[in-house]
Image (tube, helix red, strand yellow):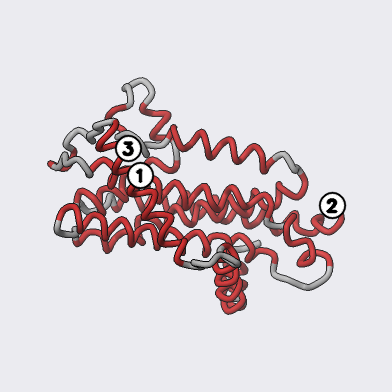
Amino acid sequence: MSLAALGKSLWRNRQLIVQMTKREVVGRYKGSSMGLAWSFLNPVFMLVVYTFVFSEIFKSRWGGVGGDDSKTQFAVVLFVGMIVLSLFSEVLNRAPSLILSNINYVKKVVFPLEILPVIAMGAALFHSLVSLGVLLAAFALFNGYLHWTAVFTPLVLLPLVILTMGLAWMLASLGVFMRDVGQTIGIITTVLTFLSPVFYPVTAVPERFRPFIMANPLTFIIEQAREVLIWGHLPNWIGLGIYTLAAATIAWAGYAWFQKTRKGFADVL
């Protein structure tokens, strides 16, 4: 149940993780005529919709943060929040059913079950990477330049990846013993869509409610992603360091819980 054991397992099964992640990504579009092209077209379509709805219909603006209040700026800023939210929610929504949908790995073969959430994360990261590419292309098209601080984006997202993995291990285990977890987590991620600063800046939240928004684990990452991608500022290194330590603790707890309870999977299934 130690982090060292987790590291050894991930390294030992690295080729299996890569192959199954590829199968996960390709399998999502299997049978469609356009195949993997959908992974690129989906974020393009959503960005076009956001741009039209918020700039032409709602006439929304982000309040001139960062000195830029163009018609398309709201859509680009919003898209950053959607990328972070999608990465988090895609993995958590799938986590409760990871073991249930792979019963053969539990009962018929010897399989490192702890890598299933890692594979789900790999697939989610692939789609987030494609969406990020679309975002950067759109930002360059709208503004004519890119901020060099965008290179820090992986470091900004890393703490969220670690946190999400810990929660995924815990939910994957709980999903075996309590089937309602899958329904509950879907409701929670939907609520987080509106309680995260995706469609609005934190400064727009009334002062008395702001502590609740800041307690949301997505808030800090969304704000930092916008700092490096949209506003061209350096990330908050101290905040990222504290967040990473807390995320690593939760990841270890989730992994330990998964390893502690995995012996009962076969009996329940």
Q: Is residue 58 left or right of residue 260?
A: left
Q: Which residue of the protein is positioned furthest toward the front in this rendering?
A: 33
Give the SS element for disc 1.
helix
Residue where numbered disc 3 is placed:
53
Residue where numbered disc 2 is placed:
268
Residue where numbered disc 1 is placed:
49
Task: Give the amino acid type for the residue marked by disc 2 in the picture.
Answer: Val
Task: Give the amino acid type for the residue marked by disc 1 in the picture.
Answer: Val
Q: Given contact means CB atoms under 8 Å apart, are the residues at marks 1 and 3 in contact?
A: yes
Name the residue: 26% across, 40% down: 74
N-terminal label among 1 and 2: 1
Residue 31: image tag: none
User: Which of label 3 and label 2 is nearer to you?
Assistant: 3
Name the residue: 23% across, 50% down: 230
Number of marks in the rendered image: 3
Residue 242 placed where, x, y %?
Answer: 39, 49
